[in-house]
Amino acid sequence: MSIERLTYFLDAVDLASFTAAAQKNFVSQTAISKQMKNLEEEIGTPLFIRQKNRVTVTAAGRQFYNHAKQLVNNYEQAVQLAYAIGSTDKQTLSIGFTTYYETQLMSPLLHEFMAQHPEIDITLLQDNFRDNNQALLSQTVDILFSRDYALSAIRDFAQIETTILEEGHMMIAVAEDDDLCQYDVVPSKALANRDVIFISSDAGVTEPHGLTDNAHKDGYAFHSITRIQSLELLFMLIRLKRLIAFFPENSLFSTNGVVFKTLANTAHCYKIILATNRQNPNPAVKMLTNFIRETQ
C-alpha cells in the first residue's frame, strides 16, 4: 500500500468522484478506478458504493478514510521535517535522559559543547529507562545519559559502549528545621524509621533502585518510601512534612527551607553513564563523546 494510492483514495472520497480525483492528480479516470479496486482487494472489503456519476464510501470506507488521512498527514510532515533539516548546514544530535539526576551533569557539558559546535543542532528527549534503552539500540536516540543500573538490560549488547561520567555518594535533602540538621555529617542510625520521598513518572517504580538494600547495608530501615512526580512537590513535602530525599552529592539545587546533608560511611551511591551505539553512523556522536572524554 503506497502513499500515492492512499492520496488517490482520499481525493476520491473528498470529491465523491473518481473522475474529479483523476483530474486533480493528472492521471486517467481508469488509473484511479484500478487503484481503488486494488486497494479494496488488498484490504478485503468494499470501500466505495459506485453510482453512475458519483461514488460514496461504505462504513468500512469511512473508517479507513480517517486513518488513511492521518497516515498521509504524518508522511507529509515527515517529508517537510526531513527537508528542513537537510536544507540546512547543521548536523543533528538526539540525546536521551530519564531523571533530574542526569540533567545536573548534562547541562554544563552540553552548554560548553554547543558553544564550541554551533553547527550541531541538539534535541533532548526525556523518557523512561526501558524506552530509552530501546531507542539507543534502534538509533532513534544517538546518545544516552543514564543511571548505571538502568543500562543492565542492554549492557551485554556488543554495540553498546558505556563510559562513567560521574560517580559518588548520595546526600539527603531535609527541612532546615529538621533534627537531622544538628549533624555536620549525618550518621546512619539517624535515618532509621524515616519517611523517604522520591521522584518518578513511572507508576510501576515503588522505590529508587537499591535504596532499601543500601539502607540495610548501613544498618537501618526506613519507615516508608513514597513516589511523586515533580521536583517542586518533593521540596514542598520535605519542608512541610519532614520527609527526606536522596540526591547525588554534586547536585546543584537550591531551594528555600531545604538543606543538603552529607551521609557518613554510606552505601548509598550513584553512577552517571554515557551510553552510545557503535553502529550509529552519525558523526556528531563521536564529536560529543570525544569532547566529554577530553573534559573529564
Image (cartoon, helix red, strand yellow):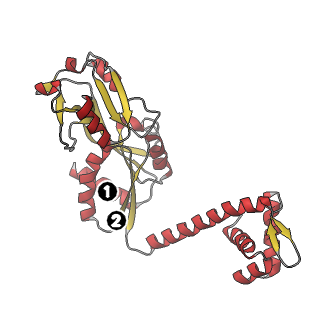
175 relative to 73, above or below: above
The residues tagged by marks 2 and 1 sit, at their Cα atoms, a distance apart of 10 Å
Q: What is the secondary structure assignment of the residue under circle 2?
A: strand
Camera-side residue of 154 and 102: 102
Q: Quadrant of residue 227?
A: top left
Q: Residue furthest top?
A: 219
Identify the residue under disc 2: 120
Q: Residue at image x 26%, y 46%? A: 104
Residue 74 is left or right of residue 245, and the answer is right
Above or below — where is 263 with respect to 58? above
Residue 197 location (% of width, % of height): 32, 31
The amino acid beneath tag 1 is Leu
Q: Give the quadrant of residue 27.
A: bottom right
Q: Residues within 10 Å of mark 2 (few under 14, many from 20)?
A: some
Q: Residue flagged by tag 2: what amino acid is it?
A: Ile
The N terminus lies in quadrant: bottom right
Disc 1, SS: helix
Q: Is residue 163 left or right of residue 40?
A: left
Q: Which residue is mark 1?
A: 288
Tell whether label 1 touches label 2 (CB within 8 Å).
yes
Q: Please report whichever mark, 2 or 1, sits nearer to the chain's N-terminal start.
A: 2
Residue 244 visible in image = no
